[in-house]
Amino acid sequence: MAHFNSALITGASSGIGAELARELSRRGTRVVLAARRADRLESLAAELRAAGGQAEVEVLDVVDTAAVREVVTRWDERLGGLDLVIANAGVGRAVTARRLTWEEVEPVLLVNVVGAMATLTCALERMRVRGRGTLCGISSLASRGGMPGSGAYSASKAALATFLETLTVDLAGTGLQVVDVQPGFVASEMTDHNDFHMPFKWNTPRAARRIVDDLERGRAICAFPWQLSVPLALTRGWPRALWRALARRARPA
C-alpha cells in the first residue's frame, strides 16, 4: 500500500477535488489545493489545518498552461518532489446536439483536455527524472461511449482516458504509477445542474474514499459504481448501431 506524503489537486475548491483533499489530509498527506476560487480554497485549507492537516493554497486556472507549469514546478521543488498529482479540474453540462454551440464546446475541451494533459505532463517531466510518483486523472464512465446530450464532455473524457492509458503503457517499469479514475454520477455542483435521472449516484465522501483506496493500491483504473461500469464495459463489444439505438432512447429532450 502506497502512502503519499504530498499531493497537488486541481479543481480542489469543490466536489470530488475538495473531498479528495479532505480524505488525503486525513491520511496524513500534505495537500496543495489548486483552483480558481480563492475564497473556497482558503476556507477548505483552514478546515484541513483545524483538523491537524497541512494544506497550501494555489489560485490556478488550468487553461493557462504556462501557469500550470510554474505551479507544478514550484511546489515540486518546495516539497522535495510531489508524490501525487491529481488532474481533477473539469467542466461540462448536458446539451443536446440540437442546441449545441461552439461556445459551449470550447471551454470543455480547454479545461478537460488541455488543462488536464498540461497538469499531468508537467508533473510527468518532474517525476520521470527521479523515477517515482503517481499521476492521476479524473476521466469518467462517460469516456466509454457517446453519451446522449454529452458530446463535448464524453469526447473530452475519452481523450483523457486514452492519454492515461498510453501513459500507463509507456511508463511501465519506470517507477511511476498512472491511475485513471472513471466515476459515474457523483453529487457535485456540476451534477446539480443535470435535469435527468442519474442512477446509482454516489456522494463525494464515498467517491473520495474509493479513489484514495485505489490510489494507495496502485490500481490502473478506478471505475465506479459497478452497476454502471460493468454494463458499460460489456457494451464495448457491441455493434455501434445497437449502442446508438439504445443511447437515442436515453437522450435528453
Image (spheres, rainbow, N blue to C red):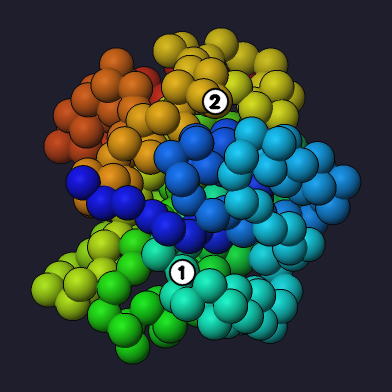
Residue 194 appears in view: yes
Whole-percent x, y for residue 41 in the image: 77, 48
Whole-percent x, y for residue 88 in the image: 55, 50
Would you place residue 101 above or below residue 147 in this image? below
* Residue at 54%, 25% in the rendered image: 204
Residue 16 appears in view: no
- Dot 1 corresponds to which residue? 82
Q: In the image as oriented, which residue stretches furthest toward the front?
A: 52
Choose top left, top right, bottom left or bottom right for residue 92. top right
* Residue at 79%, 56% in the rendered image: 36
Camera-side residue of 212 and 27? 27
* Residue at 22%, 33% in the rendered image: 233
Secondary structure type for disc 2: helix
Would you place residue 196 above or below residue 119 in this image? above
Whole-percent x, y for residue 71 in the image: 65, 75
Q: Residue 136's mark?
A: none
Q: Is residue 10 rendered to the left or right of residue 154?
A: right
Mark 2 or 1, nearer chain start: 1
How far is the residue under mark 2 from the one under mark 1?
Answer: 24 Å
Secondary structure type for disc 1: loop
Would you place residue 91 above or below residue 107 in this image? above
Amino acid type of the residue that numbered disc 1 sits on in the rendered structure: Leu
Would you place residue 69 above or below residue 79 in this image? below
Q: Residue 204's mark?
A: 2
Whole-percent x, y for residue 249 in the image: 46, 16
Q: Check whether the beta carbons of the residues at disc 2 and disc 1 lie within 8 A of each other.
A: no
Amino acid type of the residue that numbered disc 2 sits on in the rendered structure: Thr
Q: In the image as oriented, which residue stretches furthest toward the left?
A: 173
Label 2: how many residues lie within 10 Å, few (<14), some (14-19) or many (20+)? many
Q: Is residue 15 rendered to the left or right of residue 1?
A: right
Q: Is residue 12 rendered to the left or right of residue 161?
A: right
Choose top left, top right, bottom left or bottom right for residue 161. bottom left
